[in-house]
Image (cartoon, grey):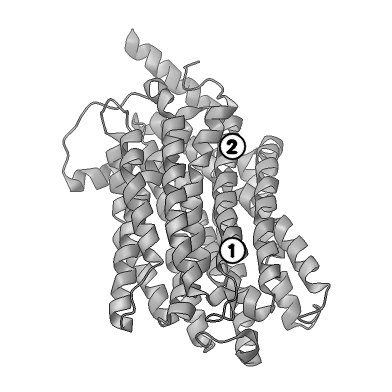
Amino acid sequence: MTEAAAKLGLTTKLTYGFGAVAYGIKDNGFAYFLLLFYGTVVGLEPALAGTALLIALVFDSLSDPIVGYWSDNTRSRLGRRHPFMYAAAIPVALCYSLLWQPPDWSDGALFLYLVVLAILIRTLITFYETPSSALMPELSADYDERTTIQAWRSFFGWAGGAGMAVFMYAFLLVPSETYPVGALNRDGYETYGVISGGVILVAILISALGTHSRIGKLKAPPPRARKGLKAVFEEVIGTLRDKSFFALFISTIASAVATGLTAALTFIMLTYFWAFSSVEVFYWTLLVVVSAVVGLLIAPWASKRWGKKGAALRLGVLAFTVQPMPVLFRLLGWMPENGDPLLFPILATVNTIDLGLIIAMQAILYSMLADLVEHTEVRTGRRNEGVFFSALTFIRKTNQGIGAFAAGLILQAVAFPDGAAPSEVPRASLTQLGTLLVPSQWALWGVMLAALAFYRLDRAQHQSNLVAIQARAAKSKT
């Protein structure tokens, strides 16, 4: 057993996982607050805000495989991954802070401001998240330990994002004379930008420094090879030409779009559809940390019990059947009315458990992706963790891109008013919002589960791949 394949200590798992706080804050901000902030607080047309994020996603689609390939083929005294992680820390923190301090410009100029910063943030986060994620299959080759490592990373990502949101609702998004509705407090968002930028910087540095001692124990970089851009993309496509990867890619894309759509509308639904108070939204957000703990505990257990594919399918069917039910029941008149003391406990309990299942399923999906590294190495003779996890980074960014774009279209379709108090939103708009949201969620989740059924790699195949790689390495030494 190699040193890199040896069991990791808890400290390494924690410091590596803690780096996900950076992406969690960025992910949470883009998914939950950005559309609300620009479309409702700042006053940019919701469809324009969603379009800006989609444009950034299109521009960013090229950076993911390039950074992944670049990381796989980098030679330095800091190894393949850490130079990118260190280099991204300050720029991404600065740009994220500026995102929440937009100038008072016209819609056209503000649209360009959002597009430029969204592109910069997506590109810079790629320089951190892709190499950082690619460390996971290098840190351990063990089928079950990979799920545990990813479960910690998912926990910190969700808990970090939720923790910052809790801080926002407790101290920043509070009613004032200028902003009677706390969720519309522009000053609070600007302060959030400064604080969250600082936390992102700290999280990236802790993760990079915490795994720094492992640099010499990781896989050696491949020999240098000078290739043109066309050759690079041909190699990337060749690496990703695997039926199980394609199934996982389509599945995760559908899941990410559904998650992004849901996330972009979450606080609008809480504030307007369910008419929850700022205090109730605060507790709702706080419970996400509990969901993260549930996911941390369930993912390794479910993976060992049913295997990764079986666990992901079981958790997905249960979670995604339940998630849209409260909105559907409200449309059917089966839920307590807004203001009823039973409404919040019912919804909070359902959401906390359901989100925990989703977090566990996501951790397992990323662990499944890690197992494809050795599966493809047997076929191609190359280790391309960066290429694989650039696909993961791209998929996760799709969460905000297409999901937020779809959310913007839905808000536009129901004629959702800008900056309105909950009591001022027409009931017909809220009914239409729920009517469009539920079937959209179920359709996307259905595609996700159907695609996942075609993933073929299991525990036995993974072990067979490890044996084949070890045999090939021993043969090359003789």
Q: Are marks 1 and 2 in contact (CB under 8 Å)?
A: no
Q: Nearer the viewer, mark 1 or mark 2?
A: 1
Q: Quadrant of residue 150?
A: top right
Q: Residues within 10 Å of mark 1 (few under 14, many from 20)?
A: few
Of residues 203 and 80, the one drawn nearer to the viewer in this rendering:
203
The residue wearing badge 2 is 147
Mark positioned earlier in the residue sequence (1 or 2) = 2
Q: Is residue 341 left or right of residue 110?
A: right
Residue 450 appears in the figure = no
Three-letter code, disc 2: Thr
Give x and y (percent) for residue 165.
Answer: 57, 60
Of residues 441 and 399, the one drawn nearer to the viewer in this rendering:
399
Does 210 appear above or below 442? above
Q: Residues within 10 Å of mark 2 (few under 14, many from 20)?
A: many
Q: CA separation, marks 1 and 2? A: 35 Å
Identify the residue at image location x=44%, y=18%: 470
Mark 2 lies on a secondary structure that is helix
Q: Residue furthest top?
A: 478
Identify the residue at image location x=67%, y=58%: 286
Give x and y (percent) for residue 303.
Answer: 66, 39
The residue wearing badge 1 is 171
Of residues 428 and 366, the one drawn nearer to the viewer in this rendering:
428
Give x and y (percent) for residue 60.
Answer: 32, 58
Identify the residue at image location x=59%, y=37%: 147
Q: Residue furthest front?
A: 177
Does 166 appear above or below 416? above
Of residues 446 and 167, the one drawn nearer to the viewer in this rendering:
167
Q: Quadrant of residue 54?
A: bottom left
Residue 434 appears in the figure = yes
Q: Quadrant of the C terminus?
A: top left
Three-letter code, disc 1: Phe
Mark 1 lies on a secondary structure that is helix
